[in-house]
Every structure is written in structure tokens, then in C-alpha cells.
Image (tube, rainbow, N blue to C red):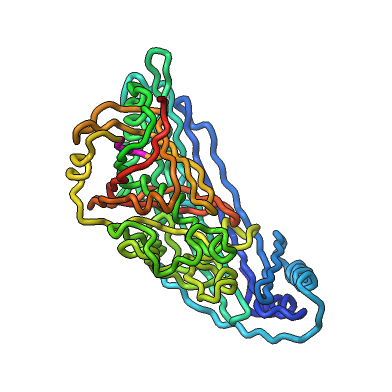
Amino acid sequence: MLSKELCAEVLSKALSSGADYGEIFAERTPSGSLYMVNNQLEEISDSVKSGAGIRVMKGTRTVYGTTTDLSRQSLLALAAQVSEVLGQGSAPISIRLTQKAVASRHPIVRISSEAPKSDKLEVLKRCYFAAKDADARIIQVKASLADVDRNILIANSDGDYIEDRQIRTRIYCTAIGEEGGVTESGFYGPGRRMGMEMFESEVNPESVGKEAARVAIARLGAEFCPAGQMTVAIENGFGGVIFHEACGHSLESDSVATGTSQMAGKLGKQIANEKVTAIDDPTIPHAWGSIDVDDEGTPTRPIVLIEKGILKSYMIDRLGGRRMGMASTGSGRRQDFNYEPSSRMTNTYIANGEDKNEDIIASIENGLYCAKMGGGSVNPITGAFNFGVDEGYLVKNGKITTCVKGASLIGTGSEVLMNIDMVGQNRFHGQGMCGSVSGSVPNEVGQPLIRISSITVGGRS
């Protein structure tokens, strides 16, 4: 994208007013999608995102600017602008860049962006019609297949010149069921850091469609969930979103460094039940949220956030590290060049425990089993959260019984961590997109079946 010589020249200009750190982030990202509805291909979309951002720092002051023009003239003009905003000066800066190799853990067999549209459509149709034909009560299906080929370049005043390629593919399906004038929907959307080979080895398109339809049909017969304080079991996979939102964001240095996190100042202290070990691992091969190097050029590694209830680490980007006096953990991420990076999660999960899954359900006398979690909201300052339950069942005397709808889980991150008193052994991950100050980035969440001894369940009283 940009030569080492050009990057060195631009960085030198950016640092000329006294900055102690400078960085260029450039990218060229082709992406595409196919969308089916009403038994036909409704839309084909292809686009390319290209541009660069220049950041300078002095202490904890930071200035960031962007451009879609990657010419020498444009980049030097942008460098002069960010340099001028940071301060006045004319000190000559010499930058020498060395290329650093990135060892990918995610070999690609069939690059999705280069695959024929006909191949992609065949995969999408398998998913779509599997959902449509799953049950006569399915009245509509929406399905899409999306891929992204993210090519990035990071050059900085530390002398690093790093290039990386991140290929991801994801399939989505929403099924809508109707019975007696009542409609309900089900959704499933697995993705991987893979190409089209994902549909041969990891994700079966028919299974995706059938799962979306299954959830929709299950919800059709659901009663409204009663409200109250309950014991709750949350299933694996996307159930991990409750840790991601209610606790994970509070462990990012953006909020910790400014003292606006419920977890600030708690390193080395017990913040969760001793059965809880939580990890953010960007190194999992082919996982949706995996990165080999972060968007600041820092190599990634697994981060043990909580070990047997004890807070062991935060997720730290470069600016957060400066504010906290700590090293980056390789957690600086951004949606694209339009965003300045911030500390973000990658693949965040609660590790397997020692409890048997059947014992977890059997231990609940009167409670709720959350088979699938939905979206929600959280306040990272207080940790207060509210999450919808997409598929839930009442548990009576240790048995899963009636399907219920309209349930939500309400509490705080610090409270729920202490109340996780049983952790199962069937860890699985779900995929999604996480939005924050640096845009929307691919995230994976996961956990085994867990039990929360007591939590407020919203519903109908």
C-alpha cells in the first residue's frame, strides 16, 4: 500500500512539532455480501474501503486525522495538520523503519472475495431453503452471506513497518414463524476467520437455517416469563455475551484508565466467584475475533483476565497503557482507518469448570434456563446491565419445562460475577459485532453452561 520510504517521510513530518510517538494506519478492504428473501436473491453488494489515519502523541495527549487520498502530497499535508494541532515546533526527526513479519495462525484455502458468486449463492440457498422447509409455520426467511478481506499496514516511530491480511466469512439467517396470528423470529449467524472452506469443515449451511427456524418455532408456543428473583442457568455459545457486556467492557483500559470503570483499582483482588476463570484470547486459530497483531502493530497473546475469581489483567491499548503506566496487551482495535484505536475484546470467554451440566439443571428448584441470549445494554461505569433472552425455559424441580418469552436479565457485572456458582464443561463460542468508541469490530463470546445463584429476571408479574 505505502512504501517504507514514504511512511518514514510522513512520520517525520508528523513528529516535527514535538510529538513523542507517531503512527500511520492504512488499509484496503474489499468486502461483499449476498442477500436472499422471498425465495430469491434480492441484493448483491461489493465495495472497497481504502484510506489512512495518522496519529501523534505527546504524553497522554493524542491527535488523529484521516484521509482517503493515499498520495504522497495528501499524506504529508495530513501529517502537517496533526502535527500543528498537537503543538508548535520544527525539530527534524529521522525515522528508520524495519519490516516485521506477522505469522498467521489462520491459513486460508479459498479466499471468499475471489470465489465465484455462483458458489456463494449455492451455499446461501442451502441455508435459506433449509430454514424455509423446516416447518410449515415458517412464513419468511432472510439469509445473507458476507465476506471481508482486510489488508492493513501499520508504521510507527518505534521503527515498526507491519502488514497483515485478515479474511473473514459469515452467514446469517433469520426465520419468522406464524401461528394463530402470532409471529416470532429466530436467528443464527456463525462466522469464522476463514474463506469458503468454512462451509466444508466448520459450518453446515443447512444447520444454520434449521437452527434459526427451530428457535422461531419454539418461541411460537411460549408463554410470558414471570418476573422476580431467580436462579438462572445460561447456556454456552452466545450466552457468553453476558460476560462480554456486563464485565468485559469494564476491563478495557479506556474506562479503567479514566477511573470510569467498576473494575478500576481492583487488580489482584477477588471480583468473581472462585469458579470463574475468564480469558480474552486473540490467538485461537480461525476464530471470528482472532487477530495476530492489533491495529497498533502490537503482537497479540492470550490474556487471563480473571483466574479463579481473582482479577489478573486488564485489556490495554497504547494510549491506555500510557495513562495507566502499564504495557499494551495487544488490545488496540478499530473498525477501520476512520477510527482512532481503543482497547477492545477479541475472543472473550469463561473457561470450562468442574461441574457437570446435568447437575447444574438438576440443582435448580425454581428458575430459568436461558438457551439463547439476545442483545442488551450496559453502563460500564456502574456495570448495570439489561439483557434479553431470545430462547428461555422455566425450570421446575430440576427439569426444563415450559418455553417462555419476554424474559430479561437485570443486574450489575460485579454482582453477577460473584453469583456464578456453578460452571459446566461444554464451552462453545458465538460470533457477533461489538460497537464502542473505535467502531464495530468482530468479537467472539463463549462459555460453558453456567449457573447464577440469584439474579433479577424481568418479565410479567
Q: Position of residue 27 (x, y in %)?
A: 60, 62
- Which residue, as the protein is rendered here, is positioned at the far top? 180
Judged left or right of residue 359, residue 114 is right
Front one among 160 and 219: 219
Q: Decide which of 86, 407 is in the foreground and name it.
A: 407
Task: Quarter of the image for the N terminus: give it.
Answer: bottom right
Which one is in front, 308 or 64? Answer: 308
Residue at 29% of width from left, 42% of height from top?
Answer: 233
Residue 356 lies in magenta, yes or no? no
> Residue 243 appears at what percent x and percent y?
40, 51
Q: Height in image: 168 above or below 391?
A: below
Which quadrant of the rendered structure holds the C terminus? top left
Magenta residue check for 369: yes
Q: Position of residue 329 (x, y in %)?
A: 47, 70
Q: Residue at x 23, y 52 (%)?
A: 425
Residue 402 vs residue 76: left or right? left
For the question of whether residue 130 can be seen, the reply is no
Residue at the image position 24 percent from the left and 56 percent from the top: 353
Front residue of this view, candidates 139 and 216: 216
Q: Is residue 236 visible?
A: yes
Image: 221 above or below 120: above
Where is residue 66 drawn, in percent x and y? 70, 62
Q: How many numbered discs, if any?
A: 0
Q: Quadrant of residue 85?
A: bottom right
Magenta residues, start to end: 368-372
Q: Main secondary structure of the magenta part?
A: strand
Q: Residue at x 54, y 68 (%)?
A: 317
